[in-house]
Image: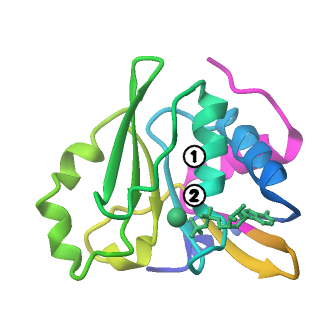
Amino acid sequence: MNPPEAAAGGAVLEREIRGEAAMEAFGARLAAVLPPGSRVYLAGELGAGKTTLVRGLLRGLGYRGRVKSPTYALVEPYEIDGRPVYHLDLYRLSDPEELEWIGIRELFADDALCLIEWPERGAGVLPPADLHIEIRHAGEARRLRLAAGSARGVELLRALAAGYPRES
Ligand code: ADP
Ligand code: MG
């Protein structure tokens, strides 16, 4: 994938986040600034905290059920506030072409929010992200690097940095 900064004027936000609860809270803050139809890609090794962040994000959107890791199913669909949300984990994808079999085009239709772990495994088939999140271990904590991949990504990073609530 191309460096997203190149497409979007270098909008980047870095944060160090300590602990699972803080990670979920950060996901909820992100939920508050995500326009419908955003594509958020989450990179980082196993155990980095990608699913934890997604769980906080889904809860922030108002989802109250259990958040399963979609590792075996590849995709876990939700409907939150009448809008489709797809959580994908491509760790077990052996070939990006397999994405065609799970109906990837439909997932990326219009107003569906897509949250994708291991996006690098779908390189070449996945459309560009609005927001790339890279998570690394930093001692007990995690270092997050959020980079915009589109104009929408630049806007939402700006809103996140300012702590603005979502307009709806
Ligand atoms: P991934 O989906 O990237 O494989 P998980 O979200 O399943 O990772 O998280 C793996 C572990 O990391 C969990 O035990 C979780 O509590 C912990 N964790 C997540 N975020 C943080 C954080 N910011 N600081 C410390 N531990 C975290
Ligand atoms: Mg995971």
Residue, x 48% and y 18% (percent of image)?
Answer: 81
**Which image quadrant: the N terminus?**
bottom left
Q: Is residue 158 magenta?
A: yes
Which residue is tagged 2?
A: 51
Q: Residues within 10 Å of mark 2 (few under 14, many from 20)?
A: many
Q: Is residue 20 left or right of residue 36?
A: right
Viewer can see residue 50: yes
Image height of 145 relative to 94, above or below: above
Q: Quadrant of residue 29?
A: top right
**Residue at 36%, 69% in the rendered image:** 90
Please name the residue shown 43% across and 38% down the image: 37
Judge whether residue 118 is colored magenta.
Answer: no
The percent position of residue 44, horizontal first and vertical second, equals 60, 77
Disc 1: residue Cβ within 8 A of ligand 1's nearest atom: no
Magenta range is 145-168
Assign a secondary structure to mark 1.
helix
- Whether the residue under disc 2 has CB within 8 Å of ligand 1: yes
Single out the mark in the foreground, 2 or 1.
Answer: 2
**In which image quadrant can residue 62 be found?**
top right
The crowding category of the residue bearing disc 1, from other C-alpha atoms within 10 Å (few below 14, some 14 to 19, many at least 20), is some
Q: Is any part of residue 132 visible from this angle?
A: no
Label 2 SS? helix
- Residue 27 image position (x, y, % from top left): 70, 46
Q: Position of residue 16 (x, y in %)?
A: 87, 67
Q: Is residue 127 above or below residue 94?
A: above
Q: Determine the CA span between mark 2 and mark 1.
A: 23 Å
- Quadrant where the image shows the C terminus: top right
Would you name the residue on which mark 1 appears?
A: 152
